[in-house]
Image (cartoon, grey):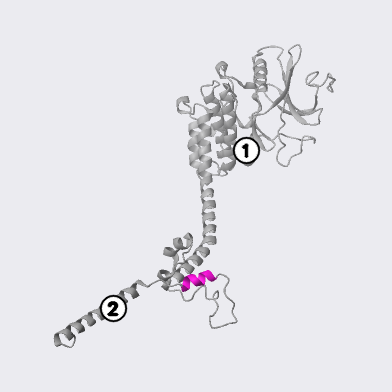
Amino acid sequence: MHSDNPPSSPLGGLLPRYTVLREIGRGEYGVVHLARRDDGGFYAVKIVQRPAEGDTRPYERELRGVLTVKRLPPLEGLVRIYDVAEAPDGSAFAYAMDLADPELDGPGPEEAGYRPRTLASVVAAEVALPLRECLDIGIRIASVLVQLQRRHLVHRDVKPGNIVFVRGRAVLADVGLAIDERDAASIVGTPGYAPPERRGSSAGDVFGLGKTLYRISTGRLPEEEGLPPCVEADIDAPFFWKWMVILSKATARDPARRYRSAKGLLRDLKRLRRLRSRPLRVAIWTAAVAASLVILLPALWNMSYMRAWVTQDDWTKTQLSLPFPYSLARPLLVPKNVPSSPFQNVFPDEESSDNPEPEHSFIREAIDTSLPDPETEVIEEFRRSNRQMEEFLKSQKGVESGEID
């Protein structure tokens, strides 16, 4: 394929689909350029030169780390490597990766003055971030470390400068030091973020992430450990000191007291996020219950009113049975004395011939069909017994006086 890069281009004949526009960053092991691919998209291209003299291990280490990550499937939260190429003579290699978002309100990649948005640049401007943002970033990067550690890989250089924002989301970048944990014997990393044992491991990546989260949440540099958080820190946020306890465990100098893997750190961060969201869930649940009561109570009151009126005098005299909700509401809401019948406008006056017969006449029939009143029956039975007794006594007196044969 024809290359748009002249021999004088930093890429030379490497990555022919990419055209270098300008340099946007420089690190210990290479230079990062802004490049445009032949499909019109912008990408970051890093070029690493093999030193002509001296130690070539950093070059080999970077190339091995990039190829290791290139073979991985796309992972959410990890910078994606698209293309890798090495010069035939082994003098340099280059790789294309995701381009970071521009700094807040800064010029885009198509304009001069573009600067990538990294976590380091964000915290440099804001000193400390809200706890909610720190928690989201921590969970996202810890999730990436969990995915790497499941493949026995370690990043070995987790720090704010190696976390960039791509399409608004935090992404772990600069994967040149990534290696199989079983082969991680060399001493690498950034002072202040590298673990005291100075050896790449899962616990070492946890230490780097813990120091990063400490930096962005307290506003303090790693060497300022022990000082209180800056005034810009979100110390009034709910569970801020619980957050500090988690960071204390993540950054313990003794590896035995530290999280052994990112999985434990991720679990505690997610628990903290659930704790912070619980008051909101309780408020939503309370509002839902209150709204339900506002809707249901008037209906229950009307039901109890109807049941109360029917049961005042006629419940034992009628065969009218009301639905279950009425009987449920009756003991709770029934008023002792109901001033008027809710059916008073349903049934027409019998003496008026102008009023038509009600449509639901079976209700009228049910109410008009009286059952015997138990109290009335007892009284009548008592009176009948009295009359029979009086008649019997009169008859006995008549027999004794000879008036009755």
Secondary structure category for the residue under label 1: helix
Q: Quadrant of the N terminus?
A: top right
The Cα atoms of the two marked residues, 1 and 2, are separated by 101 Å
Q: Which residue is at a point 76% across and 37% down the rendered structure image? A: 108
Sequence order check, earlier mark of 1 and 2: 1
- Using the rendered image of the protein, determine whether residue 169 is visible from the camera's viewpoint: yes
Q: Quadrant of the C terminus?
A: bottom left
Q: Which residue is label 2 attached to? A: 384
- Tell which of 109 and 194 is nearer to you: 109
The picture places residue 36, in percent across and down from the top left corner, at 79, 29
- Place residue 80 in its image quadrant: top right
- Place residue 10 in its image quadrant: top right
Q: Amino acid at mark 2?
A: Arg
- Tell which of 151 and 44 is nearer to you: 151
Q: For the residue carrying disc 2, how many other residues have a C-alpha within 10 Å: few (<14), some (14-19), or many (20+)?
A: few
User: What secondary structure predominates along the stretch shown in magenta?
Assistant: helix
> In the visual, does 381 lie left or right of 239?
left
- The region drawn magenta spans 361-368
Mark 1 or 2, closer to the camera: 2
Q: Are marks 1 and 2 in contact (CB under 8 Å)?
A: no
The picture places residue 84, in percent across and down from the top left corner, at 73, 20
- Using the rendered image of the protein, determine whether residue 225 is visible from the camera's viewpoint: no
The picture places residue 20, in percent across and down from the top left corner, at 80, 26
Q: Which residue is label 1 attached to? A: 123
> In the visual, does 97 lie left or right of 139?
right
Q: For residue 237: magenta? A: no
Q: Is the residue 133 above or below the residue 288 in the image?
A: above
Q: For the residue carrying disc 1, how many other residues have a C-alpha within 10 Å: few (<14), some (14-19), or many (20+)?
A: some
Q: Amino acid at mark 1?
A: Val
The picture places residue 255, in percent across and down from the top left corner, at 48, 25
- Place residue 69 in its image quadrant: top right
